[in-house]
Image (spheres, coloured by chain):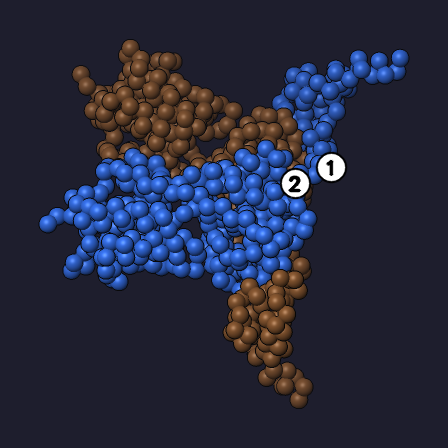
Chain colours: A blue, B brown
């Protein structure tokens, strides 16, 4: 008998919402909430009306707030130089999806490429009990970061980074991407190709330079050191170096923009100098963005599946989180392939 | 005497780094770290060499790791529908800057517009002890979100949202922005202007529609309800609705894209339909992005200072965090002004 009457009573109780109370008392949801939370700003008459409605409907306030005090969602942290970079953003989307499907919340932090701040954020995320971390350090060789990574008690998967080498890592094949890009430009007859990309302290800078060198070696074409600008992946660097390159006595006939934040700056610099693409200079960008597709002319790019990269990174991390011990000498390495998307920003150099 | 000798000894001790040990032992940084952390994978001979180098240099391992266990960085949380949206991304940049300057770390989470997930993430951020929260709820009227916000024990500042009304909020003047945009198109002679924007459950949708109506009322021009597409701010929605609008028997002569993620989709849809901008249709986008500036033709936009919006939101929050009690009936409201940037995507309609 008792269990039966409970069964009958239950539905009407659990389906009563704050909205019902608000409707019954003819007040806003905010007012109901303020009464339930004993907020002093409600007039006595309104308060009485709401309390009567709460009693009449049998509404139980603060169910959500109560669950908040007891729930224990697990979390994956993600520490990047800049989640605003469209490529990291797409990666985050894939990683968030997989994490959430497995019941994990996903928390992001941006170091803005500052190692000191990165150490603070790393520390904070681990103190706030993330259960695993996706990490793209600003410098693969910084001893403090290496110490932090090695002393961490939760698994860490590196994204677009390959050191410290005892970590799992998920990377894209930038060496092959730039190799293809340079090979294509060489096959069109270009002999003065510039490369603008990041420093060798992170993998993308190293790999892009390697691909560039390999393509030139294979074609037997020497590289003019003055055409190498290997210091940064920032948008502003693209703007400045394109201006500087196009001001040379013998400017390059083609430029590879080895950083996806550079395209907007590069296009502005070319407009400023009155340089036409592809008539005066051929352009290949790394990373396929809306801007590359919709620019005039559309820009040839090196592309890879960023969301898939994020999904893979999250899967490797989640797998490692289920293991004990979380660290082993058997590291997992996943490399996402790159491809070249031919558009209308390249042609043979003039004479 | 004692303090003097300490003074002398101190510099040489504190400046010894892991790098010095690695150099002295002729091993990699990773190897030094593994020895310091008693990792089993180091060969005995190498281990002995590193231990000798540690003793010789006086290096103190795990300084960073130790500071990790004792430091207590304070944190500001930020819960948005989508930090990948370039406009939220710029806002985050400003808020991060101010937070960091005040010694706070900044942690982000994306709800992807899903209220259930938003509740989880809100709960998680508060459980993990953020000291304040910047929040753009997916729905200003959802009773569960209102309960959560009202029961929170840390200050919350709403960004681009104005309810619940007892919260501080920092918003941009979207009503005025769209008012100006519609007024400009009406002054060019347009009488069939379409508006694509989000639903009325969040402030930007409500305010953009309001500005659109006010401009038409002021000009005495009736609005054709079929030209209103008021359901979403998503990129895909822009693509679909532009296609649908341009397939009408009497298509609009101008379109206001009331969501900054829509421009890429809209441009793709127009190319697909063979519609030229501005010859066949005039376009105004909300939110000034690289794509709007560098598209062909460059797109007229409604612009506001997003980084400043982020800086203001962080300042209001930090101010509130210093107060006691953190909630008061005196809410702070900051409205960031909007302006219209005229480019080449609009002209008078034909005939």
Name the spot of residue A284 as percent of width and height, x first: 28, 45
At x 58% / y 68%, what residue is drawn?
A: B32
Q: CA distance from mark 2 to mark 1?
A: 13 Å
Name the side, left or right, on which B104 lies relative to A65: left
What label does residue A74 carry, if any?
Answer: 2
Q: Which residue is mark 1?
A: A70
Mark 2, secondary structure of its residue:
strand
Is disc 1 surrounded by few (<14), some (14 to 19) or many (20+) residues within 10 Å? Answer: few
Q: Are marks 2 and 1 in contact (CB under 8 Å)?
A: no
At x 59% / y 33%, what residue is drawn?
A: A101
Is disc 2 surrounded by few (<14), some (14 to 19) or many (20+) residues within 10 Å? Answer: some
Name the side, left or right, on which B170 lies relative to A210: right
Mark 1, secondary structure of its residue:
helix
In this figure, what is the number of numbered marks?
A: 2
Location of residue A252 by image quarter: bottom left
Check the picture and name the quadrant holding the C terminus of chain B.
Answer: top left
**Residue B313 in sight here:** yes
């Amino acid at each position: 008998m008792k269990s039966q009457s409970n069964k009958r009573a239950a539905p009407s109780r659990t389906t009563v919402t704050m909205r019902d109370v608000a409707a019954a008392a003819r007040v806003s949801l905010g007012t109901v909430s303020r009464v339930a939370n004993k907020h002093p700003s409600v007039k006595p008459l309104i308060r009485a009306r709401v309390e009567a409605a709460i009693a009449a409907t049998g509404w139980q306030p603060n169910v959500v707030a109560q669950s908040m005090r007891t729930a224990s969602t697990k979390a994956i942290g993600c520490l990047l130089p800049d989640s605003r970079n469209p490529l990291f953003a797409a990666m985050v989307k894939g990683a968030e999806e997989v994490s959430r499907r497995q019941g994990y919340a996903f928390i992001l932090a941006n170091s803005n490429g500052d190692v000191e701040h990165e150490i603070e954020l790393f520390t904070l995320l681990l103190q706030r009990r993330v259960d695993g971390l996706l990490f793209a350090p600003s410098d693969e060789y910084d001893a403090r970061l290496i110490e932090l990574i090695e002393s961490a008690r939760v698994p860490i998967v590196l994204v677009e980074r390959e050191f410290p080498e005892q970590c799992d890592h998920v990377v894209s094949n930038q060496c092959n991407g730039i190799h293809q890009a340079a090979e294509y430009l060489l096959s069109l007859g270009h002999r003065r190709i510039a490369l603008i990309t990041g420093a060798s302290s992170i993998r993308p800078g190293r790999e892009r330079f390697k691909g560039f060198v390999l393509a030139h070696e294979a074609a037997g074409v020497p590289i003019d050191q003055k055409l190498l600008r290997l210091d940064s992946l920032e948008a502003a660097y693209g703007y400045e170096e394109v201006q500087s390159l196009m001001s040379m006595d013998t400017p390059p006939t083609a430029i590879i923009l080895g950083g996806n934040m550079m395209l907007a700056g590069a296009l502005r610099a070319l407009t400023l100098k009155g340089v036409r693409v592809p008539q005066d200079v051929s352009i290949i960008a790394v990373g396929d963005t809306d801007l590359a597709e919709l620019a005039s002319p559309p820009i040839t790019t090196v592309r890879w599946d960023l969301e898939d990269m994020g999904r893979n990174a999250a899967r490797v991390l989640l797998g490692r989180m289920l293991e004990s011990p979380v660290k082993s000498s058997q590291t997992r390495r996943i490399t996402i392939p790159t491809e070249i998307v031919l558009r209308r920003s390249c042609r043979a150099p003039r004479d």
